[in-house]
Amino acid sequence: MELDHTESWEFGRTLRRWRDRVTPEAVGVPTGRRRRASGLRREELAGLAGISADYLTRLEQGRATAPSAQVVEALARSLRVSDAERDLLYQLAGHAAPGLDVVSSRVPPSVQRLLDRLSNTPVVVYDASWTLVLANAPYDALMGETSGWRGLERNAVWRNLLAPPNRVVQTAGEHAVLVAGLVADLRLTASRYPADRGLRRLISALADASPRFTELWESDAPPPTGDKSRHKTIEHPSVGRITLDCDVLHVAIDDLRIMVYTAEPGTEDAERLALAVVLGTQSLTAG
C-alpha cells in the first residue's frame, strides 16, 4: 500500500521524533566524547533496523511512501516503542497491526532486556515460522553476517534445505534430523496460525522449490530421532573449529525462538569463541 503525501509526512515526522528520544545507551550503541545529539543518529537507527541510512532519510522526509510491514516492525523494535506506539506506526505506514492469528516478529521489552544482557554472547532470534527476527553482532561474527539476507533467505527452513552449506559442521544424518525437526515444527506453527497468508506463502514457496520439504510435510511419520546433543561445531574462517553449547529458548507467550551459543569458561573453545567474536566484530565494523 502506498501512502499519500500527508500520511508519509506524518510517518516520517513520528520516526524523527521517536528517534530523538531514544538514548544510544538504551539500545547498546557506543557513544563518543564529541557527540552532540542526545538521541540516535540516522545511521545508528538504520543499522539497528537493518535498512540503509539513505532509505531511512527518505522515510523521515516523506519521500519513501511504501514501507513494508517488515521494515515497520524492525523500526518499532529498534526504537523500543510500546505496543500502542507500534500499532500507531503500523497505522501511519498504511498497515494493519498484526493480530493474534498472525505469526508475530514482535520482541517485547522484557525479552529485549534479556537480549541486552547477552550483548557479548552470540544470539539469534527467530519467529514461529523460523524466519530471522534479529541476530546480534557476536552471532554475525561467529556465523557470518546476516544483514544482507532478504526474503526467503531469512528463513531457517529454506536455508537448511536450499542454501549453500553454512559454517556449522554436520554429518548427513545430523542435517537430516535438523531439517525434519524444523519442518515438523513449521507444521505445528501452520496449525496454530491458519489465517496467516504470509505463512501460507512461505510453505508454498518451500514446496515449489524443495521436493524434500514436500516429502517431509506430507509424511505422517514423526521426525527421525538422532543425536539430541546441544553441542554444535562451527568452522570459523579465522580461528578454526569451535565446539559450543547451543540452547534454544522458547518464549511461549510471544512464540519466539532464541538460540544462544556458549562455551564452558576456561576451555580452548571459550578462548576461540572470544577471539572469533573480537575478530568478526572488528571486521563488521570496518566493513
Image (cartoon, rainbow, N blue to C red):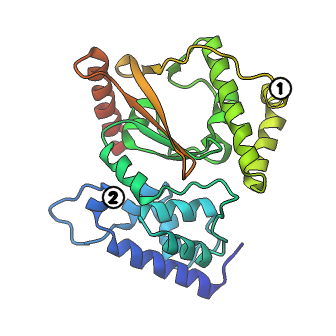
Q: Position of residue 209 (x, y in %)?
A: 80, 34
Q: Which residue is mark 1?
A: 219
Determine whether label 1 and label 2 are within 8 Å by CB.
no
Q: Is residue 127 left or right of residue 282?
A: right
Instruction: Look at the picture and state if 70 lies above or below 90.
Output: above
Residue lying furthest bottom in this view? 6
Q: Position of residue 274 (x, y in %)?
A: 28, 28
Amino acid type at mark 1:
Ser
Dot 1: what SS? loop
Residue depicted at x 45% and y 27%: 246
Location of residue 96 by image quarter? bottom right
Q: Nearer the viewer, residue 283 or 3?
A: 3
Residue depicted at x 32% and y 18%: 269
Q: Is residue 179 left or right of residue 78?
A: right
Q: Which residue is mark 2?
A: 27
Q: CA distance from mark 1 to mark 2?
A: 44 Å
